[in-house]
Image (cartoon, helix red, strand yellow):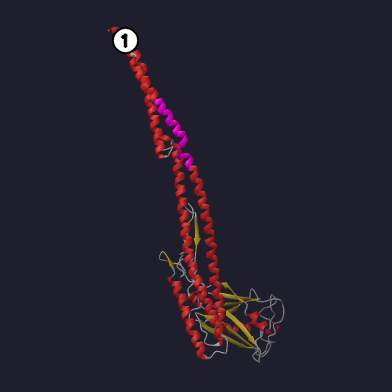
């Protein structure tokens, strides 16, 4: 009888323990704000949540990486902005020096400023850095093997080695008017020094384009070859590999026997464009920006060598009208190279800005998904804790009642 009467008390005690445990768990969840505080709360949910957390933190860091990448690009682009300004000033001085109203002393003074500006471009290229990493001295350029600079002039398709100079035509097929007695002068710059080759047209009816090539061929600095596979093209190849030996500002001027410049012929023969860029032997120093949370999610950026030596504007000579005229062409090429590099940097910066926006959006959405798995529903858990507290208080009261039942047996014994 006594044992049977104790069974309700034991059952009530067990239920009270269950309710107390439920209340404790609800309190733990409410205090931590997490539905899953240990693996036992939801083993599968914990594994999924931790994987999502890794992705979220990776995305957040990748976003910061992108911001750092933009800062690096802006540093390099800012230096090139100043390089642009200096090149524009140098070109302005070259145009000034081209005017024969200047005396030798005037050109000497202009030359002094040109020299200092060239040295400043060199200094900017060598010393611009981000977090001690050099940016525009070639250290972060892509891998390259030594290559000789090649520049080519695409003539009219009817041109060939047998075409006589008096039959030379422009790209539209119009005769450019080279005649006997004319003078053809080719000028260019290598490492800041002007080079010149002159061809006297003794007989335009018998001399052909090969004569022009022969005049250039064997020059101490530059070699020229007429491409027999493409008879409408003149190729000029630097005598040596590397950027210091590249051909800068190559132009040809045709003058009549009386010294008058022939525009059509000069323009036709001066239409040279780089077909093979000069290159120095370099290991790959390009930059890898980690712009994702996982392996391989990177953006590669290389920045070309933008020093004055590479641009061909260091020690640029403007002491004579001819040198100044060549300097203008050299500076035009240098300005174009810097513009191309700045354009590339700007495009990469814009790409990184879009990347950062996408990373932030992805991180936000993934964090929301992780929250739904890991975080507690506060309203629901308050309700559960209230329920557990009520049941706990009720079971405690019932336990007291259950413990009173054995007392009735004792009264019979009395």
* Residue nearer the viewer, 185 or 33: 33
Q: What residue sits 52% from the left and 74% below the top? A: 85
Q: Residue at x 47, y 62 (%)?
A: 71
Q: Residue furthest bottom?
A: 258
Q: Give the range drawn in magenta.
A: 370-392
134, above or below 155, in the image: above
Q: In which quarter of the image is the C terminus?
A: top left
Side (left or right) of 405 relative to 52:
left
Residue 359 appears anywhere in the view: yes
Q: What element carries label 1?
A: helix
Residue 77 in picture, x, y percent from top left: 50, 67
In percent of width and height, residue 340 lies at 55, 69
- Report if residue 391 lies within the magenta region: yes
Image point (39%, 38%), residue name: 31
- Disc 1 marks which residue? 409
Does the rendering let one see residue 38?
A: no
The front one of 201 and 121 is 121
Q: Quadrant of residue 164?
A: bottom right
Classed neighbour count for the residue bearing mark 1: other residues with Cα under 10 Å, few (<14), some (14–19), many (≥20)? few
Q: Is the magenta stretch mostly helix, strand or loop?
A: helix
């Amino acid at each position: 009888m006594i044992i049977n009467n104790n069974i309700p008390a034991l059952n009530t005690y067990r239920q009270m323990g269950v309710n107390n445990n439920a209340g404790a768990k609800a309190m733990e969840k409410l205090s931590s704000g997490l539905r899953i505080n240990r693996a036992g709360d939801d083993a599968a949910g914990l594994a999924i949540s931790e994987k999502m957390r890794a992705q979220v933190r990776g995305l957040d860091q990748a976003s910061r990486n992108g911001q750092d990448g933009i800062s690096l690009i802006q540093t390099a682009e800012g230096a090139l902005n100043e390089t642009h300004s200096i090149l524009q000033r140098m070109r302005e001085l070259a145009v000034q020096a081209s005017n024969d109203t200047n005396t030798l002393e005037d050109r000497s003074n202009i030359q002094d400023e040109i020299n200092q500006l060239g040295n400043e471009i060199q200094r900017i290229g060598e010393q611009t850095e981000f977090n001690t990493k050099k940016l525009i001295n070639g250290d972060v350029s892509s891998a390259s093997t030594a290559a000789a600079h090649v520049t080519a002039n695409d003539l009219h398709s009817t041109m060939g080695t047998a075409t006589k100079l008096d039959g030379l035509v422009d790209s539209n097929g119009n005769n450019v008017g080279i005649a006997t007695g004319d003078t053809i002068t080719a000028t260019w710059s290598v490492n800041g020094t002007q080079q010149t080759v002159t061809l006297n047209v003794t007989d335009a009816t018998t001399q052909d384009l090969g004569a022009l090539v022969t005049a250039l061929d064997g020059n101490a600095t530059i070699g020229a070859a007429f491409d027999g596979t493409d008879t409408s093209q003149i190729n000029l190849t630097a005598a040596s590999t590397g950027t210091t030996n590249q051909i800068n500002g190559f132009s040809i001027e045709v003058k009549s026997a009386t010294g008058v410049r022939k525009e059509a012929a000069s323009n036709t023969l001066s239409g040279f464009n780089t077909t093979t860029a000069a290159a120095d032997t370099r290991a790959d120093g390009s930059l890898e920006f980690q712009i994702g949370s996982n392996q391989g999610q990177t953006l590669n950026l290389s920045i070309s060598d933008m020093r004055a030596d590479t641009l061909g504007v260091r020690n640029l000579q403007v002491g004579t009208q001819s040198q100044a005229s060549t300097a203008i062409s050299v500076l035009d090429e240098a300005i174009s190279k810097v513009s191309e590099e700045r354009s590339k940097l700007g495009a990469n910066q814009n790409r990184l800005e879009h990347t950062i926006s996408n990373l932030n959006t992805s991180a936000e959405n993934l964090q929301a998904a992780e929250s739904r798995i890991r975080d507690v529903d506060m309203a629901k858990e308050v309700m559960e804790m209230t329920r557990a507290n009520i049941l706990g208080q009720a079971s405690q009261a019932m336990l007291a009642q259950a413990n009173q039942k054995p007392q009735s047996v004792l009264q019979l014994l009395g």
